[in-house]
Image (spheres, rainbow, N blue to C red):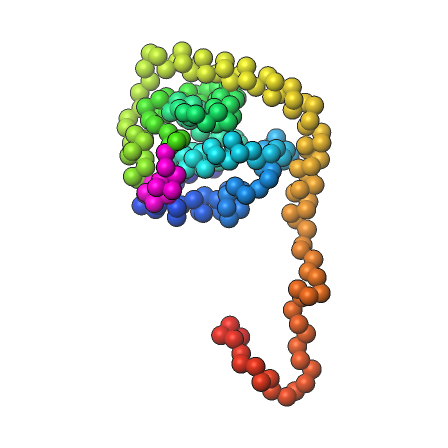
Amino acid sequence: MSSVASYDPSLSLRAALPLYFAENGFGEDGGYGDAWVDFKLGPIPMPFPNTPGRLRAVRYHDMHHLITGYRADQATGEFEIAAWEVGAGCRGFWAAWHLNLGGLAAGALGLPRRAFRAFVRGRRASSLYGRDYEALLDKTIAEVRAECGLDQPIEARASDLPLFILATLAGAVLAVPSLAALVVVSPPLVLAGLFRRSERGKPVERTQSERAPAPPTSSAPSSQPRSAAA
């Protein structure tokens, strides 16, 4: 699978977001209304709280996936978008800084060239963090790409590598307490994630009142008009 997702640049962000949600299985509202969200450790889902700080940031994060083309997958795309967002800047969105620095550090370890290229691309662009969200929804992907400087040529400068190394070290430092906490809480989180997955797969059991009424046994014609769907 390509590491780049392509959406029609003439689509508004409002029209493109449902396509992005459907492609990635995020639900109709992108999971914004969920109390918990899953982080997958390989095939194992690990739920963590959908905090107000994360929710505030993730709406812009999803838009960034649309305009940059980085896929929302944990093989390459999330590492690349994390590096891009650090390069472009997350302004006062501290949850985004924390998550992205950790993602950049992981990307630098596993995909150093891709992570560095995405970081440099971000350094030549501007992010959407802090902009009027509702106003952005009515702009096209092409318009927002141009406003963010994503159509400009990318060329690394002498200052990019030291800054990338500094960001990687910062992400590694931030990751230490997170990993320590993960070791402690991972067993119950794994169990909770597997339980949530199994619950999603169960068929919904209807109550007696929700079941469709039995067809009439009488052969007499009904006095009720038929609906247009009949």
- Evaluate whether residue 38 shows in this view: no
Q: In the image, what residue occupies the spot 66% across and 64% down?
A: 210
Q: Is residue 214 magenta?
A: no
Residue 7 spot, x, y in % from top left: 38, 43
Q: Is residue 142 left or right of residue 200?
A: left
Q: Is residue 46 above or below residue 97?
A: below
Residue 192 spot, x, y in % from top left: 69, 37
Q: Nearer the viewer, residue 121 or 94?
A: 94
Q: Is residue 99 above or below residue 201?
A: above
Residue 115 spot, x, y in % from top left: 44, 23
Q: Nearer the viewer, residue 94 or 222?
A: 94
Q: Quadrant of residue 114?
A: top left
Q: Is residue 125 above or below residue 196?
A: above
Which stretch appears magenta?
131-141
Q: Is residue 137 magenta?
A: yes
Pick out the residue farthest to the bottom.
Answer: 220
Q: Is residue 173 left or right of residue 163?
A: right
- Evaluate whether residue 189 shows in this view: yes
Residue 8 spot, x, y in % from top left: 35, 45
Q: In the image, what residue occupies the spot 32% across and 23% down?
A: 124
Q: In the image, what residue occupies the spot 45% across and 34% down?
A: 61
Q: In the image, what residue occupies the spot 70% across and 61% down?
A: 207
Q: Nearer the viewer, residue 214 or 7?
A: 214
